[in-house]
Image (tube, grey):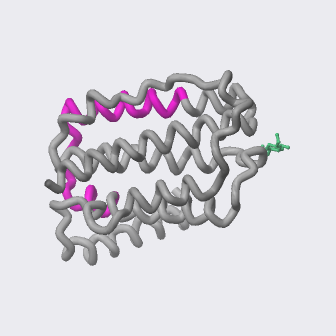
Amino acid sequence: MTTFCLLQISLVLLCTTKISTLDCNILPLLHNKVIQGNLHLLNQMGQQFPEQCQSEKMHFKFPEQFLKLRQKENAKVEIQEILQQTFYIFTKNLTLAAWDGRSLERFQNRLNQQIEHLEACLIEKKQPYSRSEEIIRLKLKKYFQKIDNFLKHKQYSLCSWEIIRLEIRRCLQFIDKVIRRLRN
Ligand SMILES: *[C@@H]1O[C@H](CO)[C@@H](O)[C@H](O)[C@H]1NC(C)=O
């Protein structure tokens, strides 16, 4: 393990102490319009979906039905997984995406902050994942693997990125709905 990595771990541990004073039982994401902010930046970074990309569209089968019935505690794990994987996708080769760099950067930074916050809360909890959580995590991993493969296969073309931007928007809209339901 590198020194940098160790430093990161100690930082996370340090932060955990601070965050534990917050209420980690409720999703930090319940406050403000966090996901809506992500969606806003996602919209802002590009234009309308280009007509010439229609024919390349693909169905990635987001595992909606598995996420619908989740309880608040479990939802944290899944939301963290989704944000983490989304962040990972948006670190791929974006050269051809032709998006607004500022919005893209803000989107990446935001995701990063949200992931760190959720991670700190999950470390606090320290429970191993339950079987149903593992299943959902696997389903999510598969879903994002498909997205990853698609981009690779299309060589990170403009159309492939626009299709993924649309897909991630749908995915985040779904999380937003789940969070709203949990709040009520
Ligand atoms: C990213 O994609 C562009 C365009 O296809 C290519 O020229 C560049 O070498 C790629 N960058 C990396 C780091 O792979």
User: Which region is colored magenta?
Assistant: 119-146
Residue placed at 62% from the left, 63% from the top?
A: 103
Q: How many marks?
A: 0
Along the line of sight, the residue nearer the viewer: 135 or 79: 79
Q: Quadrant of ligand 1?
A: top right
Decide: is 100 above or below 7.
above
* Residue 115 visible from this viewpoint: no
Q: Considering the image in quadrants, where does the C terminus appear?
A: bottom left
Query: Where residue 177 appears, x then y in whole percent?
Result: 29, 46
Residue placed at 66% from the left, 27% from the top?
A: 54
Question: Magenta span has 74?
Answer: no
Question: Magenta span has 144?
Answer: yes
Along the line of sight, the residue nearer the viewer: 171 or 52: 52
Query: Where residue 178 appears, x then y in whole percent?
Result: 26, 45
From the viewer's perspective, is 102 left or right of 114? right
From the viewer's perspective, is 67 left or right of 100? left
Along the line of sight, the residue nearer the viewer: 10 or 103: 103
Query: Where residue 39 appears, x then y in whole percent?
Result: 47, 54
Decide whether the magenta segment is chiefly helix, strand or loop: helix
Residue placed at 41% from the left, 30% from the top?
A: 62
From the viewer's perspective, is 63 left or right of 40? left
* Residue 59 visible from this viewpoint: yes
Report which quarter residue 133 is drawn in: top left
Query: Where residue 101 appears, x then y in whole percent?
Result: 70, 62
Along the line of sight, the residue nearer the viewer: 26 or 166: 166
